[in-house]
Amino acid sequence: MAWDVETPSLNLRFARPWELCYALFTLKGGIQSIHSHLLRWPNMVLTEDNPSFKHFDRARYEREARDPREVYATFGPLLRKHRSVFHSGVGFDSYIEGVWRREIGLKPDYDWLYTPGCLDTNCVSKAYRAGWAFDTSSTEAFLASQYRMNHPRLPKVGKSAPKTKLG
């Protein structure tokens, strides 16, 4: 499952998603379904002058936005059933999913990052450019490799991969 969220800010502790898009697919069968949901949170201020709201349509939002609990009731089980594919998800979307869970009264649960697993295309592209290989011996080792690629002090291309206690 490929997915992405849009938020009114980049605050990893408090930013609630106002939009969720996801597609279910198989490698051999292609895209099975595409879903787009607008989320209506109480007291969330969305203004068109926010530079992160490219192509924001206020009329569509007012017409189609739904309760985040209702959307999560469908999305949450899919997240825990299918491997996630996202761009910058290890460093952003995964945290926003935790905020979403907290805001609807659930405890954050990040087990889905390694069971069934995830693939962050941003981390993969950084590793490819640097010529580094991922540890694919387990989903936990692969996740640790992605977190290393997401580190803000990532060495420049041509230097050795950062060493951590994660592997």
Image: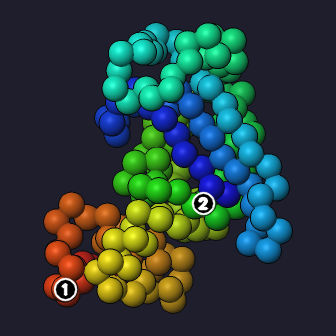
Residue 47, given in percent of the width and then of the height, sits at 41, 13
Secondary element at image label 1? loop
Residue 59, given in percent of the width and then of the height, sits at 61, 10
In the rendered image, the quadrant that contains the C terminus is bottom left
Name the quadrant containing residue 147. bottom left
Residue 57, given in percent of the width and then of the height, sits at 56, 18
Image: 141 above or below 117: below
Name the quadrant containing residue 68. top right
> On the picture, is 10 further left or further right than 18?
left
**Which residue is drawn at the image coordinates 46% and 47% (left, top)?**
93
Q: Give the Cα distance between marks 2 and 1.
A: 29 Å
- Depth check: give the residue in front, 12 or 131: 131
Alpha-carbon neighbours of circle 1 within 10 Å: few (<14), some, or many (≥20)?
few
Image: 66 above or below 138: above
> On the picture, is 167 further left or further right than 118?
left
Residue that mark 2 sits on: 84
Q: Are marks 2 and 1 in contact (CB under 8 Å)?
A: no
Residue 36, given in percent of the width and then of the height, sits at 68, 35
**Which residue is drawn at the image coordinates 16% and 66% (left, top)?**
153
Name the quadrant containing residue 96. top left
Count of marks, rendered view: 2
Residue that mark 1 sits on: 158
Q: Amino acid at mark 2?
A: Ser
**Which residue is drawn at the image coordinates 34% and 71% (left, top)?**
126
